[in-house]
Image (cartoon, grey):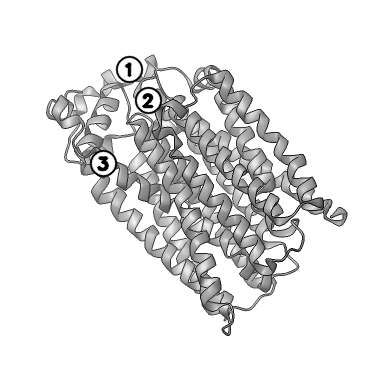
Amino acid sequence: MTIAVETEAPTRLEGKHSAMVVCFFLGFGSLVSWNSMLTIGDYYYQLFPKYHPSRVLTLVYQPFALGTMAILAYNESKINTRKRNIFGYTLFFASTLLVLVLDFATSGKGGIGPFIGLCVLSACFGVADAHVQGGMLGDLSFMCPEFIQSFLGGLAASGALASGLRLLTKVSFEKTHNGLRKGATLFLAISTFFEFLCILLYAIVFAKLPIVKYYRSKAASEGSKTVSSDLAAGGIQTNSNQGLEDDAKQLERLSNKQLFFQNIDYAIGLFLIYVLTLSIFPGFLYENTGTHGLGSWYAPVLIAMYNVWDLISRYILLIESLKLESRKGLMIAILSRFLFIPAFYFCAKYGDKGWMILLTSLLGVSNGYLTVCVLTVAPKGYKGPEQNALANLLVLCVLCGLFAGVALDWLWLIGKEGF
């Protein structure tokens, strides 16, 4: 597939910084709604005190994200990436808007009906997440590593901003009538706006950036069929006579099974990162950390510290000397994180709030840093279609880890009487 203009060297770097900014916002939009739901957990605990909303909503979210991602990863080479990502962001937008509508329709009242409605919308967030994270990371994996880093930075920034706004709204509305509800409404309105912005950025802006067109043209020349609609949106028409040639190139690529076993350490590593993180965050931080001088501020402060340090750590790799690319080194670092389990247990039982804040910050630092290390190193050395497939497989492993972590989080609840 020959597209001479898009593969010229001077054109290649044109629009790189613009693309990084767009990737940041696309990453931000892929988790801002869900992070808002988690961050306003204290509002949902007020409405549904008997239903463990933070844990239950997460437990509902994960199976739908995992099941959808498994189907998409299996069929990734046949799926139109543009339609996949636009559908995902549109579903995020619609679901976030409906959370707002549900709250207004019930006048902020609790009960089993509104909680079931919230669970249904949580499942929709899971489906949207699988479409967007797998689709975007697959798309970005054959571009610059900086694009992946910016996207992952946006993911973390959504949590940091949500936490910052949560603390701000808590100060502003805590002593007013329906203060928690007003703060939650503001959160969801902001999230709805950003989801709509992401639809526009991906559908209109991203596809037309020269550097993005260059990398997608390169991937198409290596046999990728998933980028054809995005190339057309960028003004590049592919030659229909190249179909047989592309089929031959597609057959030359490694299978998903081969890619998985060649990168099994990365896959297991990502699984373990998120098993550990989600077994502690956010459910344990909301329900098992005891009572301290911070009172109702304690859980929001812990969530904020995790999110802020998760964001900061994702930019550590900008310092070349701090990059960790050794496969053995990454696995040692990942396994060492399991020391957090006894550390959090004993800190919650015997420690002070200062130690808990420190531990939560370290959890965020290690989560963000190791995630970026693995996802930027793993795709190196493969062709475009293989990089796309590998990224989808790795996102599937992340979601498996998230689901397992959420399930294990219930063990903290079972053992709560010991605190």
Q: Secondary structure at mark 1?
A: helix
**Furthest-bottom residue in view?**
177
Nearer-the-camera pick, 376 or 5: 376
Q: On the image, which quarter does residue 397 sit in? A: top right
Mark 2 and mark 3: Cα distance apart in space: 24 Å
Is residue 74 visible to us here? Answer: no
Quote the CA–CA distance across marks 3 and 1.
Answer: 31 Å
Q: Quadrant of residue 220?
A: top left
Query: Can you give x and y, in whole percent of width and height, for residue 347 in the image?
Result: 76, 48
Q: Is residue 131 above or below residue 352?
A: above
Element carrying mark 2? helix
The C terminus lies in quadrant: bottom right
The residue labelled by disc 2 is 385
Q: Are marks 1 and 2 in contact (CB under 8 Å)?
A: yes
Q: Earlier in the sequence, mark 1 or mark 2?
A: 1
Q: Residue at x 43, y 39 (%)?
A: 315
Q: Check the image and report above or below for 288 versus 344.
A: below
* Secondary element type, mark 3: helix
- Tag 3: amino acid: His
The earlier-in-sequence mark between 2 and 3 is 3
Looking at the image, is mark 1 or mark 2 nearer the viewer?
2
Residue receiving disc 1: 249
Question: Residue placed at 28% from the left, 50% from the top?
Answer: 203
Q: Mark 1: give few (<14), some (14-19) or many (20+) Cα within 10 Å.
A: some
Q: Position of residue 212 (x, y in %)?
A: 25, 36
User: Would you place residue 265 above or below residue 230 in this image?
Assistant: above
Residue at the disc numbered 3: 17
Which residue: 66% across, 73% down?
A: 47
Residue type at mark 1: give it.
Lys
> Is residue 210 visible to us here?
yes
Q: Which of disc 1 and disc 3 is earlier in sequence?
A: 3
Q: Position of residue 189 (x, y in %)?
A: 43, 69
